[in-house]
Amino acid sequence: METVSELRSAHKALRAAVLEIANTRAACLNELPARRRAAAIEMFEHGLRCGLCMHVFAKAVRDCTGLPIEVNDLAFAAVYHDIGKLCVPAELLLAPRPLTPDERTIVQSHVTWGCVLARRALRVMRIPDPALRCALEVAALHHERWDGHGYAHALVGQSIPLAARMMAIVDCYDVIVSPRPYKSAGSHGHACGIIEADADSAFDPALVKTFLSIEHEVELTNSAWWRSPSVVRGKC
Ligand SMILES: [Fe+2]
Ligand SMILES: [Fe+2]
């Protein structure tokens, strides 16, 4: 069993990796027009928080199930799960109002774009990269639902890959506890309540149980993020 100090140094290593990614991205973001840059910053910050949360969650799922889960691959995939949003109009991503059905369909296309981008990245690599393969799966399938009412493929239950089922929970948590252009931040307790209520409909009930068993650690990770200076925004 891992000691607290091992856990802390793993966190530190992952945090260093995600900050490096953020810094690289921030340099690129300076080249973008203002609205596109704002949308990209929001997407990357959400991704970085999800990466940190996934790191905690993936360890818990690995310990609980005994499955050979690659924690760092999953955390990497979580950072990039919404990468397809770079291909969606920024006006829709930043809209401080409910979207029309047509607009929602356009935003939902980010899963298809994410898949396209990850495939391109895999093609240019000389050797198959497991983290990138995991990122492709997560980018394409993180909006599937346990009950089959998700998008883009309406997969049901365990036909949804484990990584994508885990991502759905982490994504939901971060969306609720973070401010968005159309809403203020919700509390940790509210997020956990919604996730618990949606077990067996939106989410894999066994994974929800594991997530709630480490919710204190998730809360600590999330509050540490919000206490630290903005890593991406501060660079632009
Ligand atoms: Fe998404
Ligand atoms: Fe997301």
Image (spheres, rainbow, N blue to C red):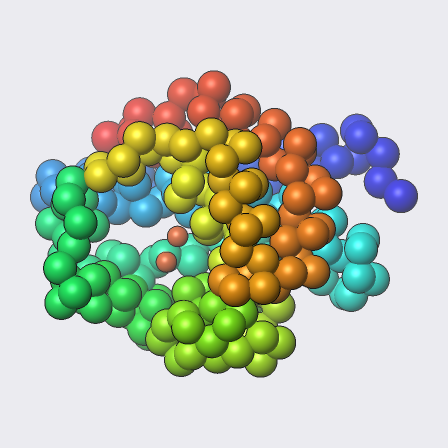
- The quarter of the picture where residue 6 lies is top right
Query: Residue 103: in sight, yes or no?
Result: yes
Residue located 45% across and 64% down the image: 142
Q: Is residue 199 left or right of residue 67?
A: left
Q: Is residue 122 left or right of residue 159?
A: left
Q: Is residue 104 above or below residue 79?
A: below
The quarter of the rendered structure image containing the N terminus is top right
Residue located 75% across and 36% down the image: 7
* Residue 194 location (% of width, % of height): 50, 46
* Residue 96 location (% of width, % of height): 16, 40
Query: Residue 164: in sight, yes or no?
Result: no
Count the marks: how many?
Answer: 0
* Front position in the image: 29 or 227: 227
* Residue 137 location (% of width, % of height): 49, 71
The quarter of the rendered structure image containing the C terminus is top left
- The quarter of the picture where residue 10 lies is top right
Q: Is residue 67 above or below residue 159?
A: above
Residue located 48% across and 68% down the image: 145
- The quarter of the picture where residue 131 lies is bottom right
* Front position in the image: 231 or 211: 211
Residue located 43% across and 58% down the image: 81
Q: Is residue 178 left or right of residue 188?
A: left
* Residue 205 location (% of width, % of height): 64, 60
Q: Is residue 236 above or below residue 65?
A: above
Q: Residue furthest right?
A: 1
Taking the image as four quarters, which one is ligand 1 found in?
bottom left
* Front position in the image: 133 or 194: 194
